Image (tube, helix red, strand yellow):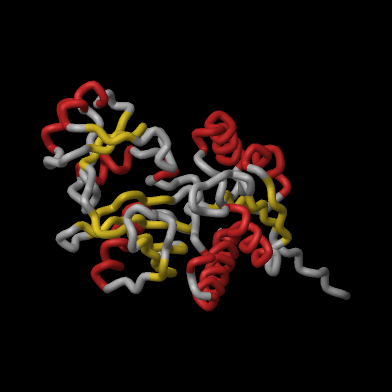
Amino acid sequence: MPTRPHRRPRLLHVSDLAYPARGRRYCDEDLHLFARLREDFDAALCHPLDAAALMGSFDAVLVRNTGPVLHYQEAYDAFRAQALADGVRVYNPLTGRADMAGKQYLLDLTAEGLPVIPTVDRPDDLAALPAAGLYAVKPKAGADSIGLQFVPREALPPLATGANLIQPRIDFRYEVSFTYIDDVFQYALYAPDPDRRWELVPYEPTAADLAFADRFIAWNTLSHGIQRVDACRTRDGALLLVELEDLNPYLSLDRVPAPVRDAFVTALKASLRAFLST
């Protein structure tokens, strides 16, 4: 008897191609990634507001460059609830403990004594912050620097309401990002000029750098997915965590050499296939 042709997995790729990201072009990155994924998957591209209505026809949903979900929080919450209720496979899995769950993790990591920019949110904890010329205050539910302000220490008490994160403004040498698929390091990029966050160039991490980043990947306990560990290099050479992005990390694929980009796509395809087999 003739064998039935093997059906390729169906993948719904979620992206907001028109989101006006500062210093980044979501559309370029996701169109490139979508074209590569179509080599192995039957894929469709949709806006995040359409994902809940469409996801039932696919084997998995890949959440990519969707912009800050606070712009469509109600729809995103409904998407999450429906995906969990219906057992839809969402990549990254909806069990992330970092940005996917809000900014509480920065407070948790501070309390655990991990190398993160010290973060508090209550008046009683302000004394635990190191002295600084200015302090960064941002909404706990914020993203993409929305609502960020820098204030002197005397202005902090009225802002420590539990709704804001408060951190000392760090005088750092540069920011560096480490990109992972599952728990495997893929590449690193850094911004030599602190005032130009998205003007990135390849960075060759040391063993100590990777040990730093690996620690946060292990803390998050995601079985599959793309994660980006953002850190700053202080004047004394230490690394401090700025953000652990596990929801929709921008990948800056246009900033890495073609062989690195190809290796990343290959690793992503393998991770997706493994995820679909669970």
Residue 184 in sight here: no
Left or right: where 31 falls relative to 135: right
Q: In this view, does 223 lie above or below 47?
A: below
Task: Judge whether residue 116 can be spotted in this image.
Answer: yes
Image quadrant in which you'd find residue 87: top right
Q: At 59% across and 41% down in the image, what residue appears?
A: 83
Quadrant where the N terminus sits is: bottom right
Residue lying furthest bottom: 259
Instruction: State which quarter of the image contains the C terminus.
Output: bottom right
- On the picture, is 127 further left or further right than 66? left
- Number of callouts in the render? 0
Give x and y (percent) for residue 211.
27, 66
* Camera-side residue of 240 and 114: 240
**Residue 270, how many percent across, how many down?**
56, 69
Q: Quadrant of residue 235?
A: bottom left
Q: Which residue occupies 15% across, 39% down?
A: 129
